[in-house]
Image (cartoon, grey):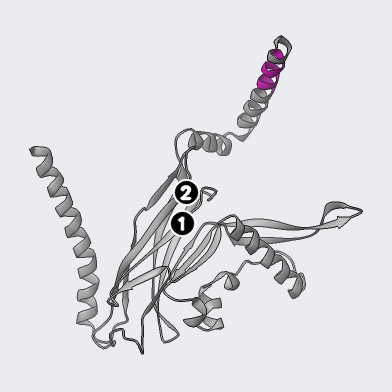
């Protein structure tokens, strides 16, 4: 009996907090007729733990659109659109181009990038090109063709474009880069939700989920939520050991390899 009462009280408290979170920005917007639209976003998981059995995850991103009194409501002539961009931590990477010489594939040209996002997913209520122009897409990095990857060399523009397309294609085939037009659902011009798939090969680190409110080709508002992706269990122990005691970790790995090889040899002799 007491457990049920406590569970109900906890549910009521959670609902009250959600109501307050949505009501506070609404009150601010209502009290300031000239204020800008406000986004109140949230995500279903603030932390994603990766264990040995991790096969991927699905993030639900949702929230409310709070328009000030002076802003017209959404209609067919002036719709409101929402774009959600989930990014992983940036990392330096080198892309190598292979060339076939005398029937053998060998490494040819290469190009390094200083800050390529390890994961990039964009979900929108309509295709990005129907929402904003090229300049706005480049400013906010909306779309795979608008990523700012920061090449680490002064290679010609055509070479940079070729390698950039190759990098995007490689990560798209791995499920680390993708676009999902029409994946954001907007209800009554007020509530929105979108689902973003996190693949099993996702890197660990601090992710960001940024939501953009777009109308008539302009970005009216933006909001960000952080998501932590980290290893758990034995995988977390191994990762921490590799970072904190790299020398001992290397010696242990070599010793285990030698021990396992010796054990396999002994078994093979007896069979």
Q: Mark 2 = which residue? A: 56
Q: Is residue 261 magenta?
A: yes
The residue stretch that appears in magenta: 258-266
From the top left corner, tell me how far across and down residue 180 is, in percent: 48, 67
Q: Earlier in the sequence, mark 2 or mark 1?
A: 2
Residue at the image point whose x is 66% and y is 62% from the top:
167
Classify mark 1: helix, strand or loop: strand
**Compared to 33, does 149 lie above or below?**
above
From the top left corner, tell me how far across and down residue 156 is, in percent: 77, 73
Tell me the chief SS of the magenta region: helix
Classify mark 2: helix, strand or loop: loop
Q: Badges 2 and 1: C-beta atoms under 8 Å apart?
A: yes
Residue at the image point whose x is 26% and y is 82% from the top:
68
Q: Mark 1 = which residue? A: 197
From the top left corner, tell me how far across and down residue 175 is, in percent: 55, 56
Residue at the image point whose x is 28% and y is 85% from the top:
73
Front-lying residue, 206 or 175: 175
From the top left corner, tell me how far across and down residue 21 is, in percent: 23, 64
Q: Is residue 41 visible to the viewer in this orientation of the structure?
A: no
Distance in Å between CA atoms under marks 2 and 1: 7 Å
**Compared to 112, does 6 lie above or below?**
above
**In this picture, residue 63 sits left or right of residue 149:** left
Figure quadrant of the N terminus: top left
Residue at the image point whose x is 57% and y is 69% from the top:
144
């Amino acid at each position: 009996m007491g457990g049920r009462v406590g569970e109900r009280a906890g549910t009521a408290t959670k609902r009250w907090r959600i109501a307050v979170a949505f009501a506070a920005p609404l009150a601010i917007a209502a009290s300031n007729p000239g204020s800008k639209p406000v986004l109140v976003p949230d995500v279903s998981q603030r932390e994603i733990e990766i264990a040995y059995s991790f096969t991927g995850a699905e993030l639900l991103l949702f929230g409310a659109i709070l328009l000030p009194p002076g802003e017209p409501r959404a209609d067919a002539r002036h719709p409101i659109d929402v774009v959600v961009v989930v990014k992983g931590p940036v990392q330096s990477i080198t892309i190598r181009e292979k060339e076939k010489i005398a029937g053998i594939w060998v490494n040819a040209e290469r190009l390094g990038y200083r800050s390529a996002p390890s994961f990039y997913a964009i979900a929108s209520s309509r295709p990005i090109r129907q929402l904003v122009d090229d300049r706005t897409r480049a400013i906010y990095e909306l779309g795979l063709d608008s990523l700012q990857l920061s090449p680490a060399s002064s290679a010609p523009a055509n070479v940079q474009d070729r390698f950039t397309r190759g990098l995007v294609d490689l990560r798209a085939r791995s499920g680390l880069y993708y676009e999902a037009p029409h994946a954001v659902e907007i209800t009554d011009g007020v509530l929105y939700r979108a689902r973003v798939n996190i693949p099993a090969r996702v890197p660990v680190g601090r992710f960001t989920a940024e939501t953009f409110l777009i109308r008539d080709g302009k970005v009216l508002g933006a909001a960000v939520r952080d998501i932590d992706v980290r290893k758990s269990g034995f995988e977390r122990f191994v990762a921490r050991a590799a970072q904190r005691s790299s020398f001992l970790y290397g010696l242990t790995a070599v010793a285990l390899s030698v021990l396992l090889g010796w054990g396999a040899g002994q078994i093979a002799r007896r069979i």
